[in-house]
Amino acid sequence: MAASARRLSKLSPLRRWGIALSVLLSVGSVLAVVVMVNYLGSRHFARFHVTGDTRYQLSPLTRHLLRTLTNEVRVVVFFEPDPQATLYSAVKSLITEYQMASPMLKVEFVDYRVNPTRAVQLRDQYQLSTTENPDLVIFEANGRHRIVYEHELSEYDLSGIMEGLPARRSVFRGEQFFTSAIIGVSDSAPVRAYYLEGHGEHDPRSEDGTQGYAGFAQLLREKNIELATLNLATNSIPPDCQLLVVAGPRNPIPPAELDQIRSYLAGGGRTLVLLSSPLRPNVRKSGLETLLAEWGVVVGDDVVVDQAQSRSAAAEVLFTSQFANHPAVRPLHRGRLSLVTPRSVRARGIDARSDGIKVDELVFTSPEGRKLTSGEGALRPGTNGPVALAAAVEKGTISGVGPDRGSTRLIVVGESVFLANTLIGWEANRDFASLSVNWLLDRGQLLELGPRPFNEYRVSLSQAQMRTIRWLLLAVFPGAVMLAGVLVWVRRRS
């Protein structure tokens, strides 16, 4: 040490300043490299998923949408940030992926318990109810906003309830709802839809559980679709009608009005037809049966039952998880519909493809399903299953051409109560309505966004394996550390 000090003292002042300057330049160069690497990394980076959990991975369709955003989209995650809550961590991770994929997304996380002042501001701004579950995500752009609620983001496995087990989250639907919300608020112009009334249809303004369709109307608004009612007795179908909804007519539709619907379809109209079940009160044939037959769809004068898939407490409710490989129902293969005494809806056969018309049956009963036909004041068994309950029709569709360019699309379902206010939230009913509307309007970017499963990992150990682990944790590992300490002490003492 003394020799080193003597050598340093013999250095000239100029030499000392040279060494100091060299050190400063070296440190400055390292800092400059670090800053440049971080600058480039913040603008040119790649993210890789190294886990098998797909809940937080964005699909190519969503990534393409985010790359094409031109307007800023504001996202407010209004959740209680409980790290132990599976759903909160899933929402946070997925929203972070959206944020990293597009600089046009401005995300704000709000803890309404820690920051009540901000919570009150958001409740007032977006007219949020204080009685509902406060956990939600808000998307806003172009003066429009869309709210995704916590209860919409999960599906539950109820199979263990009869055995006393709790309901278990089975899938996460975050990407479906988040991407749909971004499209809804960022589209420059909303879609115009008209809701037929005047024939005993469900009321889109009513909150009634089995007759009102306010929930369905809200679903359309959330998809950036402006809904207006239409009475064909006093008005004709407007030229800007991009979607016509016929939901459960119980009275006959006059021939003149049917002719208007016929002309609308012939001109490339898009129509969702939900027929009334014959077991609803005061139901008469609407006349749509004849019109739909012209498009290759046969509506049965019957009621379909399926003992293998009926709800035990209510035999009239039919559950079905049999879906065709069609874009309008393909993402539903992990779910099921709950229908109430539906009618059969089938393709007419090979003639259905004449004149360029293509008819696809969408939803089916199990092989035990059967049709009950009316006769002599009672229902009699008819054809056995599987029985088709819904169908999709296409004519003149050209790839890449929008919904208002001359291509006709219809979806026909043999029941309408399943989308009423009480039942639209059951099982996959809401998803079916959303996918049907997306397919009718040619919103292909939303059709392939299916739910992501919650992966569960379980370790099953025998009693012998448990004893081995217990000895390893309580004796072997601590003992090894203690033995190492003793050996070090002995060595240093010797």
Image (cartoon, helix red, strand yellow):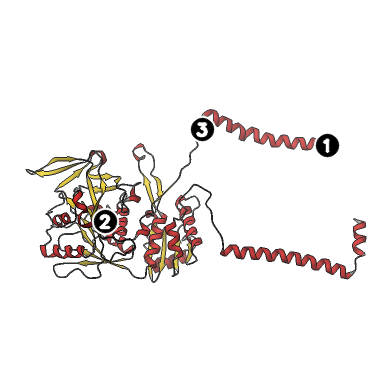
Task: Tell me which numbered mark, 2 or 3, is placed earlier along the sequence.
Answer: 2
| Labelled pair 3, 1 in contact (Cβ < 8 Å) | no
Q: Quadrant of residue 186?
A: bottom left
* Image disc number at residue 493: 1
From the viewer's perspective, is residue 64 above or below residue 352? below
Task: Tell me which numbered mark, 2 or 1, is placed earlier along the sequence.
Answer: 2
**The residue under label 2 is which amino acid type?**
Asn
Residue, far front: 355
Residue 165 x/y as whole percent: 39, 39
Nearest the camera: 421 or 318? 318
Q: What SS does tag 1 mark?
A: helix
Task: Say few, some or many: other residues with alpha carbon within 10 Å of mark 1 (under 14 / 14 to 19 / 20 or more).
Answer: few
- Which quarter shows the C terminus? top right
Q: What SS does tag 2 mark?
A: loop
Cα distance between the residues tagged 2 and 1:
82 Å
**The residue under label 1 is which amino acid type?**
Arg
* Image disc number at residue 1: none
Q: Quadrant of residue 163?
A: top left
Task: Say few, some or many: other residues with alpha carbon within 10 Å of mark 3 (under 14 / 14 to 19 / 20 or more).
Answer: few
- Residue 347 visible, this angle: no
- Residue 216 visible, this angle: yes
Task: Tell me which numbered mark, 3 or 1, is placed earlier along the sequence.
Answer: 3
Residue at 45% across, 45% down: 455
| Labelled pair 2, 3 in contact (Cβ < 8 Å) | no
**The residue under label 3 is which amino acid type?**
Leu
Cα distance between the residues tagged 2 and 3:
47 Å
Q: According to the image, label 2 marks what residue?
A: 421
Residue 162 x/y as whole percent: 33, 38
Residue at 58% across, 63% down: 42
Task: Say few, some or many: other residues with alpha carbon within 10 Å of mark 2 (under 14 / 14 to 19 / 20 or more).
Answer: many
Residue 169 x/y as whole percent: 40, 47
Q: What SS does tag 3 mark?
A: loop
